Image (tube, rainbow, N blue to C red):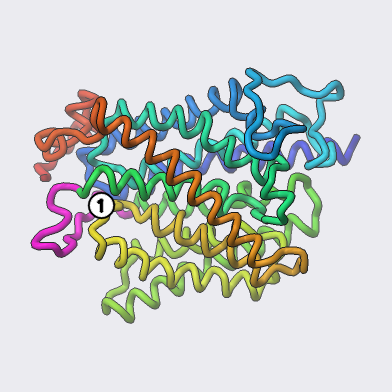
Protein backbone atom coordinates (compact mmCIF):
# COMPACT_ATOMS: atom_id res chain seq x y z
CA UNK A 1 0.00 0.00 0.00
CA UNK A 2 2.87 2.38 0.80
CA UNK A 3 4.41 1.83 -2.66
CA UNK A 4 1.03 2.35 -4.30
CA UNK A 5 0.57 5.64 -2.44
CA UNK A 6 4.06 6.81 -3.41
CA UNK A 7 3.51 5.97 -7.07
CA UNK A 8 0.12 7.64 -7.08
CA UNK A 9 1.37 10.83 -5.43
CA UNK A 10 4.31 11.03 -7.86
CA UNK A 11 1.98 10.61 -10.84
CA UNK A 12 -0.34 13.32 -9.52
CA UNK A 13 2.63 15.68 -9.10
CA UNK A 14 3.69 14.92 -12.68
CA UNK A 15 0.13 15.54 -13.85
CA UNK A 16 0.24 18.97 -12.22
CA UNK A 17 3.59 19.73 -13.86
CA UNK A 18 2.27 18.80 -17.31
CA UNK A 19 -0.80 20.94 -16.66
CA UNK A 20 1.52 23.82 -15.79
CA UNK A 21 3.15 23.43 -19.21
CA UNK A 22 0.08 25.05 -20.73
CA UNK A 23 1.09 28.24 -18.93
CA UNK A 24 4.48 27.93 -20.59
CA UNK A 25 2.97 27.43 -24.04
CA UNK A 26 0.73 30.46 -23.55
CA UNK A 27 3.61 32.67 -22.37
CA UNK A 28 5.85 31.54 -25.23
CA UNK A 29 3.24 32.09 -27.91
CA UNK A 30 2.12 35.55 -26.79
CA UNK A 31 5.71 36.62 -26.16
CA UNK A 32 6.82 35.74 -29.69
CA UNK A 33 3.85 37.41 -31.39
CA UNK A 34 2.42 40.92 -31.47
CA UNK A 35 0.41 42.39 -28.64
CA UNK A 36 -2.68 42.96 -30.79
CA UNK A 37 -3.25 39.17 -30.91
CA UNK A 38 -2.58 38.33 -27.26
CA UNK A 39 -6.19 37.70 -26.20
CA UNK A 40 -6.72 35.51 -29.24
CA UNK A 41 -3.78 33.28 -28.36
CA UNK A 42 -4.75 33.06 -24.69
CA UNK A 43 -8.33 32.19 -25.62
CA UNK A 44 -7.12 29.35 -27.84
CA UNK A 45 -4.87 27.97 -25.14
CA UNK A 46 -7.62 28.02 -22.52
CA UNK A 47 -10.06 26.45 -25.00
CA UNK A 48 -7.61 23.64 -25.78
CA UNK A 49 -7.05 22.56 -22.20
CA UNK A 50 -10.71 22.80 -21.12
CA UNK A 51 -12.32 21.18 -24.15
CA UNK A 52 -9.41 18.77 -24.52
CA UNK A 53 -9.99 17.34 -21.04
CA UNK A 54 -13.73 16.97 -21.63
CA UNK A 55 -13.17 15.27 -24.99
CA UNK A 56 -10.59 12.95 -23.51
CA UNK A 57 -13.06 11.89 -20.84
CA UNK A 58 -15.99 11.49 -23.21
CA UNK A 59 -14.18 9.59 -25.96
CA UNK A 60 -10.41 9.93 -26.10
CA UNK A 61 -9.17 7.83 -23.18
CA UNK A 62 -11.05 4.67 -24.16
CA UNK A 63 -10.16 5.18 -27.82
CA UNK A 64 -6.48 5.47 -26.95
CA UNK A 65 -6.37 2.62 -24.43
CA UNK A 66 -8.99 0.22 -25.78
CA UNK A 67 -7.58 -2.95 -24.25
CA UNK A 68 -8.19 -5.77 -26.71
CA UNK A 69 -8.55 -4.32 -30.21
CA UNK A 70 -7.43 -4.82 -33.81
CA UNK A 71 -4.28 -2.73 -33.33
CA UNK A 72 -5.42 0.11 -35.59
CA UNK A 73 -8.58 1.71 -34.20
CA UNK A 74 -10.58 0.96 -31.08
CA UNK A 75 -14.32 1.22 -30.60
CA UNK A 76 -15.95 4.36 -29.28
CA UNK A 77 -17.01 3.79 -25.68
CA UNK A 78 -18.16 7.01 -23.96
CA UNK A 79 -16.92 7.91 -20.50
CA UNK A 80 -14.57 6.02 -18.22
CA UNK A 81 -15.29 2.74 -16.47
CA UNK A 82 -12.44 1.93 -14.07
CA UNK A 83 -11.50 -1.70 -13.38
CA UNK A 84 -13.02 -3.35 -10.34
CA UNK A 85 -9.99 -2.54 -8.19
CA UNK A 86 -9.70 0.95 -9.62
CA UNK A 87 -6.06 0.43 -10.62
CA UNK A 88 -4.17 0.86 -13.87
CA UNK A 89 -3.87 -2.17 -16.16
CA UNK A 90 -0.79 -4.08 -17.27
CA UNK A 91 1.14 -1.22 -18.94
CA UNK A 92 1.56 0.49 -15.55
CA UNK A 93 1.57 -2.72 -13.49
CA UNK A 94 -1.28 -1.49 -11.31
CA UNK A 95 1.07 1.04 -9.78
CA UNK A 96 -1.42 3.90 -9.38
CA UNK A 97 -5.13 4.59 -9.79
CA UNK A 98 -7.10 4.58 -13.00
CA UNK A 99 -8.31 8.13 -12.32
CA UNK A 100 -4.77 9.45 -11.96
CA UNK A 101 -3.86 7.72 -15.21
CA UNK A 102 -6.76 9.37 -17.03
CA UNK A 103 -5.78 12.82 -15.82
CA UNK A 104 -2.09 12.36 -16.64
CA UNK A 105 -2.83 11.12 -20.17
CA UNK A 106 -5.45 13.83 -20.67
CA UNK A 107 -2.84 16.54 -20.11
CA UNK A 108 -0.81 15.08 -22.96
CA UNK A 109 -3.77 15.06 -25.32
CA UNK A 110 -4.30 18.80 -25.17
CA UNK A 111 -0.63 19.49 -25.92
CA UNK A 112 -0.89 18.33 -29.54
CA UNK A 113 -3.39 21.07 -30.44
CA UNK A 114 -1.41 23.70 -28.51
CA UNK A 115 1.50 23.11 -30.89
CA UNK A 116 -0.77 24.01 -33.82
CA UNK A 117 -2.01 27.12 -32.02
CA UNK A 118 1.42 28.76 -32.08
CA UNK A 119 2.08 27.96 -35.73
CA UNK A 120 -1.19 29.52 -36.96
CA UNK A 121 -0.99 32.56 -34.68
CA UNK A 122 -2.06 36.02 -35.88
CA UNK A 123 -4.12 35.04 -38.92
CA UNK A 124 -6.42 32.05 -38.33
CA UNK A 125 -10.11 32.46 -37.52
CA UNK A 126 -10.96 31.36 -34.00
CA UNK A 127 -14.08 29.37 -34.99
CA UNK A 128 -12.40 27.02 -37.47
CA UNK A 129 -9.48 26.56 -35.07
CA UNK A 130 -11.90 25.44 -32.37
CA UNK A 131 -13.55 22.98 -34.75
CA UNK A 132 -10.15 21.62 -35.77
CA UNK A 133 -9.15 21.21 -32.11
CA UNK A 134 -12.28 19.24 -31.28
CA UNK A 135 -11.73 16.77 -34.13
CA UNK A 136 -7.95 16.47 -33.79
CA UNK A 137 -7.85 16.11 -30.01
CA UNK A 138 -11.07 14.11 -29.83
CA UNK A 139 -10.31 11.55 -32.53
CA UNK A 140 -6.99 11.84 -34.36
CA UNK A 141 -4.67 12.03 -31.35
CA UNK A 142 -6.25 9.10 -29.44
CA UNK A 143 -6.22 6.85 -32.51
CA UNK A 144 -2.58 7.72 -33.20
CA UNK A 145 -1.69 7.17 -29.55
CA UNK A 146 -3.33 3.75 -29.46
CA UNK A 147 -0.94 2.44 -32.12
CA UNK A 148 1.91 2.53 -29.61
CA UNK A 149 0.77 3.35 -26.08
CA UNK A 150 -2.50 1.45 -26.42
CA UNK A 151 -0.75 -1.74 -27.50
CA UNK A 152 -1.46 -1.34 -31.23
CA UNK A 153 0.38 -2.52 -34.32
CA UNK A 154 3.40 -0.22 -33.90
CA UNK A 155 3.90 -1.44 -30.36
CA UNK A 156 3.93 -5.02 -31.62
CA UNK A 157 6.38 -3.98 -34.35
CA UNK A 158 8.86 -2.79 -31.73
CA UNK A 159 8.47 0.95 -32.27
CA UNK A 160 9.44 2.91 -29.15
CA UNK A 161 8.40 6.36 -28.00
CA UNK A 162 8.83 6.79 -24.27
CA UNK A 163 7.03 10.10 -23.71
CA UNK A 164 5.92 11.41 -27.08
CA UNK A 165 8.57 12.85 -29.42
CA UNK A 166 6.34 11.43 -32.14
CA UNK A 167 3.06 10.57 -30.42
CA UNK A 168 2.61 14.10 -29.02
CA UNK A 169 5.08 16.49 -30.65
CA UNK A 170 5.16 15.19 -34.21
CA UNK A 171 1.42 14.56 -34.20
CA UNK A 172 1.01 18.27 -33.45
CA UNK A 173 3.90 19.22 -35.72
CA UNK A 174 2.53 17.54 -38.85
CA UNK A 175 -0.80 19.30 -38.35
CA UNK A 176 1.01 22.61 -37.82
CA UNK A 177 2.85 22.13 -41.11
CA UNK A 178 -0.39 21.53 -43.01
CA UNK A 179 -2.14 24.44 -41.32
CA UNK A 180 0.66 26.92 -42.05
CA UNK A 181 0.74 25.82 -45.69
CA UNK A 182 -3.04 26.15 -46.17
CA UNK A 183 -3.22 29.48 -44.31
CA UNK A 184 -0.40 31.30 -46.05
CA UNK A 185 1.99 33.76 -44.48
CA UNK A 186 1.16 36.82 -42.42
CA UNK A 187 0.94 40.16 -44.18
CA UNK A 188 4.43 41.63 -44.31
CA UNK A 189 6.30 38.40 -43.55
CA UNK A 190 7.76 38.13 -47.05
CA UNK A 191 8.84 41.12 -49.11
CA UNK A 192 10.13 40.55 -52.63
CA UNK A 193 10.41 36.89 -51.73
CA UNK A 194 12.64 37.51 -48.71
CA UNK A 195 11.54 36.77 -45.14
CA UNK A 196 11.15 39.77 -42.86
CA UNK A 197 11.43 39.64 -39.10
CA UNK A 198 8.17 40.30 -37.25
CA UNK A 199 9.39 40.71 -33.66
CA UNK A 200 7.41 39.40 -30.75
CA UNK A 201 6.14 42.00 -28.30
CA UNK A 202 7.38 40.48 -25.05
CA UNK A 203 10.58 38.42 -25.15
CA UNK A 204 10.89 38.32 -21.33
CA UNK A 205 7.50 36.58 -21.24
CA UNK A 206 8.63 34.14 -23.95
CA UNK A 207 11.73 33.38 -21.87
CA UNK A 208 9.58 32.72 -18.81
CA UNK A 209 7.44 30.44 -20.97
CA UNK A 210 10.42 28.32 -21.96
CA UNK A 211 11.57 27.99 -18.35
CA UNK A 212 8.04 26.97 -17.32
CA UNK A 213 8.00 24.38 -20.12
CA UNK A 214 11.37 23.02 -19.03
CA UNK A 215 10.01 22.66 -15.49
CA UNK A 216 6.89 20.99 -16.84
CA UNK A 217 9.03 18.48 -18.71
CA UNK A 218 10.04 17.04 -15.33
CA UNK A 219 6.46 15.76 -15.21
CA UNK A 220 6.15 15.09 -18.94
CA UNK A 221 9.14 12.73 -19.02
CA UNK A 222 9.41 11.90 -15.33
CA UNK A 223 5.78 10.81 -15.18
CA UNK A 224 6.17 8.65 -18.28
CA UNK A 225 8.15 6.19 -16.16
CA UNK A 226 4.63 5.38 -14.87
CA UNK A 227 5.91 4.87 -11.35
CA UNK A 228 8.11 6.50 -8.74
CA UNK A 229 10.95 4.06 -9.46
CA UNK A 230 13.93 5.97 -7.97
CA UNK A 231 16.68 4.94 -10.38
CA UNK A 232 14.72 5.17 -13.62
CA UNK A 233 12.96 8.41 -12.68
CA UNK A 234 16.23 10.06 -11.69
CA UNK A 235 18.00 8.94 -14.88
CA UNK A 236 15.09 10.23 -16.96
CA UNK A 237 15.25 13.68 -15.37
CA UNK A 238 19.03 13.83 -15.82
CA UNK A 239 18.90 12.95 -19.53
CA UNK A 240 16.01 15.37 -20.03
CA UNK A 241 17.88 18.29 -18.48
CA UNK A 242 21.20 17.55 -20.18
CA UNK A 243 19.53 17.38 -23.60
CA UNK A 244 17.74 20.68 -22.97
CA UNK A 245 20.95 22.39 -21.91
CA UNK A 246 22.91 21.03 -24.88
CA UNK A 247 20.14 22.00 -27.29
CA UNK A 248 20.10 25.58 -26.07
CA UNK A 249 23.88 26.05 -26.08
CA UNK A 250 24.39 24.54 -29.52
CA UNK A 251 21.47 26.46 -31.07
CA UNK A 252 22.89 29.72 -29.71
CA UNK A 253 26.39 28.84 -30.95
CA UNK A 254 25.33 27.75 -34.44
CA UNK A 255 23.08 30.80 -34.75
CA UNK A 256 26.00 33.04 -33.76
CA UNK A 257 28.31 31.43 -36.30
CA UNK A 258 25.71 31.82 -39.07
CA UNK A 259 24.27 35.24 -38.29
CA UNK A 260 26.93 36.87 -36.09
CA UNK A 261 24.52 37.75 -33.31
CA UNK A 262 23.50 36.17 -30.01
CA UNK A 263 19.82 35.46 -30.73
CA UNK A 264 17.88 34.78 -27.54
CA UNK A 265 14.85 33.36 -29.37
CA UNK A 266 17.08 30.81 -31.11
CA UNK A 267 18.60 29.95 -27.71
CA UNK A 268 15.10 29.40 -26.30
CA UNK A 269 13.92 27.25 -29.18
CA UNK A 270 17.14 25.26 -28.94
CA UNK A 271 16.27 24.36 -25.35
CA UNK A 272 12.81 23.24 -26.47
CA UNK A 273 14.31 21.31 -29.38
CA UNK A 274 16.58 19.44 -26.98
CA UNK A 275 13.61 18.62 -24.76
CA UNK A 276 11.53 17.35 -27.66
CA UNK A 277 14.47 15.37 -29.02
CA UNK A 278 15.16 13.45 -25.80
CA UNK A 279 11.51 12.74 -25.06
CA UNK A 280 11.30 9.57 -27.17
CA UNK A 281 14.14 7.84 -25.34
CA UNK A 282 14.83 9.65 -22.08
CA UNK A 283 14.67 6.40 -20.10
CA UNK A 284 17.02 4.39 -22.35
CA UNK A 285 19.86 6.90 -22.90
CA UNK A 286 23.15 7.46 -21.17
CA UNK A 287 23.85 11.05 -20.11
CA UNK A 288 26.46 11.31 -22.87
CA UNK A 289 23.96 10.20 -25.51
CA UNK A 290 21.42 12.68 -24.15
CA UNK A 291 23.88 15.54 -24.56
CA UNK A 292 24.62 14.49 -28.14
CA UNK A 293 20.92 14.12 -28.99
CA UNK A 294 20.17 17.54 -27.53
CA UNK A 295 23.13 19.13 -29.31
CA UNK A 296 22.05 17.79 -32.69
CA UNK A 297 18.48 18.97 -31.99
CA UNK A 298 19.82 22.46 -31.21
CA UNK A 299 21.70 22.61 -34.50
CA UNK A 300 18.65 21.30 -36.37
CA UNK A 301 16.57 24.15 -34.96
CA UNK A 302 18.74 26.81 -36.59
CA UNK A 303 18.76 25.15 -40.00
CA UNK A 304 15.08 24.18 -39.84
CA UNK A 305 13.97 27.74 -39.06
CA UNK A 306 15.90 29.14 -42.03
CA UNK A 307 14.66 26.35 -44.32
CA UNK A 308 11.04 26.95 -43.33
CA UNK A 309 11.53 30.64 -44.15
CA UNK A 310 13.21 29.74 -47.45
CA UNK A 311 10.21 27.72 -48.63
CA UNK A 312 7.96 30.64 -47.61
CA UNK A 313 6.14 29.00 -44.73
CA UNK A 314 5.34 31.37 -41.87
CA UNK A 315 5.61 29.86 -38.40
CA UNK A 316 5.64 32.73 -35.88
CA UNK A 317 6.90 30.69 -32.91
CA UNK A 318 9.07 28.04 -34.58
CA UNK A 319 6.65 25.23 -33.70
CA UNK A 320 7.40 23.17 -36.81
CA UNK A 321 11.15 23.29 -36.25
CA UNK A 322 10.85 22.45 -32.56
CA UNK A 323 8.08 19.89 -32.43
CA UNK A 324 8.15 18.26 -35.86
CA UNK A 325 11.81 18.29 -36.92
CA UNK A 326 13.21 17.60 -33.44
CA UNK A 327 10.40 15.13 -32.76
CA UNK A 328 11.42 13.11 -35.81
CA UNK A 329 15.09 13.33 -34.85
CA UNK A 330 14.45 12.24 -31.27
CA UNK A 331 12.39 9.27 -32.41
CA UNK A 332 15.05 8.10 -34.85
CA UNK A 333 17.75 8.68 -32.22
CA UNK A 334 16.24 5.87 -30.15
CA UNK A 335 17.24 3.47 -32.92
CA UNK A 336 20.81 4.80 -32.79
CA UNK A 337 21.60 5.47 -29.12
CA UNK A 338 19.21 3.33 -27.06
CA UNK A 339 20.77 1.10 -24.42
CA UNK A 340 18.05 -1.45 -25.19
CA UNK A 341 19.24 -3.69 -28.08
CA UNK A 342 15.62 -4.45 -29.04
CA UNK A 343 15.14 -0.87 -30.27
CA UNK A 344 15.98 -0.71 -33.97
CA UNK A 345 16.35 2.16 -36.38
CA UNK A 346 14.08 0.44 -38.92
CA UNK A 347 11.19 0.16 -36.45
CA UNK A 348 11.62 3.81 -35.49
CA UNK A 349 11.64 4.87 -39.15
CA UNK A 350 8.48 2.89 -39.87
CA UNK A 351 6.78 4.53 -36.89
CA UNK A 352 7.74 8.02 -38.03
CA UNK A 353 6.44 7.27 -41.54
CA UNK A 354 3.12 5.88 -40.29
CA UNK A 355 2.44 8.92 -38.15
CA UNK A 356 3.49 11.26 -40.96
CA UNK A 357 0.98 9.77 -43.39
CA UNK A 358 -1.86 9.56 -40.87
CA UNK A 359 -1.43 13.08 -39.48
CA UNK A 360 -0.82 14.75 -42.84
CA UNK A 361 -3.92 13.16 -44.35
CA UNK A 362 -6.27 13.74 -41.41
CA UNK A 363 -5.16 17.31 -40.70
CA UNK A 364 -5.37 18.17 -44.41
CA UNK A 365 -8.88 16.76 -44.70
CA UNK A 366 -10.07 18.69 -41.65
CA UNK A 367 -8.40 22.02 -42.50
CA UNK A 368 -9.04 21.90 -46.26
CA UNK A 369 -12.73 21.21 -45.66
CA UNK A 370 -12.88 24.15 -43.25
CA UNK A 371 -11.04 26.37 -45.73
CA UNK A 372 -13.48 25.57 -48.53
CA UNK A 373 -16.61 25.91 -46.39
CA UNK A 374 -16.30 28.53 -43.65
CA UNK A 375 -12.81 29.81 -44.45
CA UNK A 376 -9.85 29.63 -42.08
CA UNK A 377 -8.15 33.00 -42.52
CA UNK A 378 -9.27 36.36 -41.15
CA UNK A 379 -9.70 39.35 -43.43
CA UNK A 380 -6.82 41.69 -44.24
CA UNK A 381 -8.40 44.42 -42.12
CA UNK A 382 -8.78 42.10 -39.13
CA UNK A 383 -5.21 40.87 -39.44
CA UNK A 384 -3.74 44.38 -39.66
CA UNK A 385 -5.78 45.75 -36.77
CA UNK A 386 -5.40 42.63 -34.62
CA UNK A 387 -7.58 39.67 -33.76
CA UNK A 388 -8.16 40.77 -30.17
CA UNK A 389 -10.46 43.63 -31.07
CA UNK A 390 -12.22 41.94 -33.97
CA UNK A 391 -12.75 38.44 -32.58
CA UNK A 392 -12.85 39.12 -28.85
CA UNK A 393 -13.77 42.78 -28.42
CA UNK A 394 -11.04 43.44 -25.88
CA UNK A 395 -7.39 44.31 -25.46
CA UNK A 396 -4.80 42.46 -23.40
CA UNK A 397 -3.25 45.74 -22.28
CA UNK A 398 -6.15 48.16 -22.08
CA UNK A 399 -4.08 50.97 -20.57
CA UNK A 400 -1.13 50.57 -22.91
CA UNK A 401 -1.81 50.63 -26.62
CA UNK A 402 0.57 50.65 -29.54
CA UNK A 403 -0.17 51.36 -33.15
CA UNK A 404 1.35 48.25 -34.71
CA UNK A 405 0.68 46.83 -38.14
Left-right relation of 176 to 147: left
Q: Quadrant of the C terminus?
A: top left
Q: Which residues are magenta?
A: 186-203
Q: Residue at x 16, y 38 (%)?
A: 383
- The local crowd at label 1, few if under 14, some if 14 to 19, many if 20 or more residues have their Cα within 10 Å, is some
Front-lying residue, 82 or 204 = 82
Whether 236 is drawn above or below 394: the answer is below
- State the residue position of label 1: 200
Residue 371 in view in this figure: yes
Q: Main secondary structure of the magenta part?
A: loop
Q: Position of residue 386 (x, y in %)?
A: 17, 36
Front-lying residue, 280 or 273 = 280
Left-right relation of 369 to 218: left
Whether 102 is drawn above or below 119: the answer is above
Q: Quadrant of the N terminus?
A: top right
Q: Residue at x 17, y 27 (%)?
A: 390
Q: Is residue 402 magenta?
A: no
Left-right relation of 294 to 130: right
Amino acid sequence: MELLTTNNVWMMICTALVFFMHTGFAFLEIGLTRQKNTINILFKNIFIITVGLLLYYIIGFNLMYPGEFNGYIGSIVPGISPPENGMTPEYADGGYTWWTDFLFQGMFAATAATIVSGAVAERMKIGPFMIFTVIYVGFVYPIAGSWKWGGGFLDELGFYDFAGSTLVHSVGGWAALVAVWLLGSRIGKFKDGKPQAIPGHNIPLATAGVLVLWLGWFGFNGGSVLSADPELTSLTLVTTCLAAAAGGVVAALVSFLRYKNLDLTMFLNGILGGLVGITAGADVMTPESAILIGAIAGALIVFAVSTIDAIKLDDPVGAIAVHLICGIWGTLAVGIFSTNPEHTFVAQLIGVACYAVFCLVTSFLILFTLKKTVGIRVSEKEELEGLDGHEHGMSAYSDFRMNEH
